[in-house]
Image (cartoon, grey):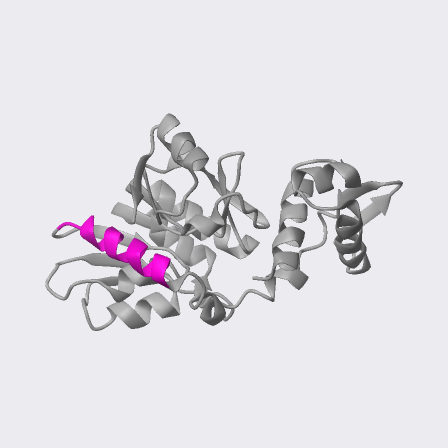
Amino acid sequence: MSKKLERMNAILEILSHKSGELVKNLATELNTSEMTIRRDLKELSDKNIVTLMQGVAIFNNRNSSSMLRKQYDLCLEQKIHADEKTRIGLKAVSLLEENDVIAIDTGTTTEQLAKNLPDNLNLTIVCYNMNVLMHIKDKTDRIILAGGHYHSNTQMFQSPEGVALISRTSVNKAFVSAAGVNSKFVASCIDQYETDTKKAIIESAIEKILMVDSSKFDKISPVTFADLQEFDTIITDDNLSKEWREHINDIGIRLYLV
């Protein structure tokens, strides 16, 4: 994802939690110039996503941020921080136990868990993504697929019936992805349609494990789906900043650096 798109997503995340924000405050919070923020806001205003009034930006709740979301492409994301995602996936595999019932969330980092699953471990796997399904289909016949409408940008299946199926399933370990983890200790994702399913696997699981590479920290994506404190474990790469390591330890979350 480009820096411009990341910045626009960050602007929308900030505005979604406020009735309005000054342009100069957005510039300060995002550590960039007011001119840059004004250009971004002009583009968002032209798309009717935000309204500008006397130096204040207001998020139009009735309108979606689909202009930004359409630029997410799972196949492209697979190539970004690929080595870190592989290491995170391998660490997640090491946490599995015989006869676990696991849920594997949408995303390119969680895909590395599915890709590296051993052939000799008896698992029941809950999933709702084409990329995950393709990796696990020959490794186990104990698959619970929560189907529904197919979203090609994330390769995710989504429906109320799929959410209900997940909610009825007892999961030992949920492996969850995030597009952003910000300083307010919330995890966020790319699109609104992801949230009900993500929340369902978190609520149905005994142990909640967040798999996210270090580039996602201090990054804001459009839709918040969980407080960081909801997770028992975070697996990330060893490029994570000292400040974030301390934050995570302070709130009592087990942290694995790979």
Q: Is residue 257 left or right of residue 161?
A: left
Residue 53: image x %, image y %?
87, 43
Q: Is residue 191 magenta?
A: no
Q: Quadrant of residue 242?
A: top left
Viewer-nearest residue: 216 or 44:
216
Where residue 101 appears, as percent x and y from the top left, is: 22, 51
Q: Read off the magenta span.
A: 83-97
* Residue 10 relative to residue 81: left or right: right
Residue at the image position 81 percent from the left and 59 percent from the top: 46
Q: Is residue 166 left or right of residue 97?
A: right
119 above or below 56?
Answer: below
78 lies left or right of 96:
right
At 29% across and 43% down in the image, what residue appears?
256
Q: Nearer the viewer, residue 227 or 142?
A: 227
Instruction: Answer yes or no: is residue 20 visible.
Output: no
Q: Is residue 138 visible?
A: yes
Residue 184, position as x, y percentages in the image:
54, 34
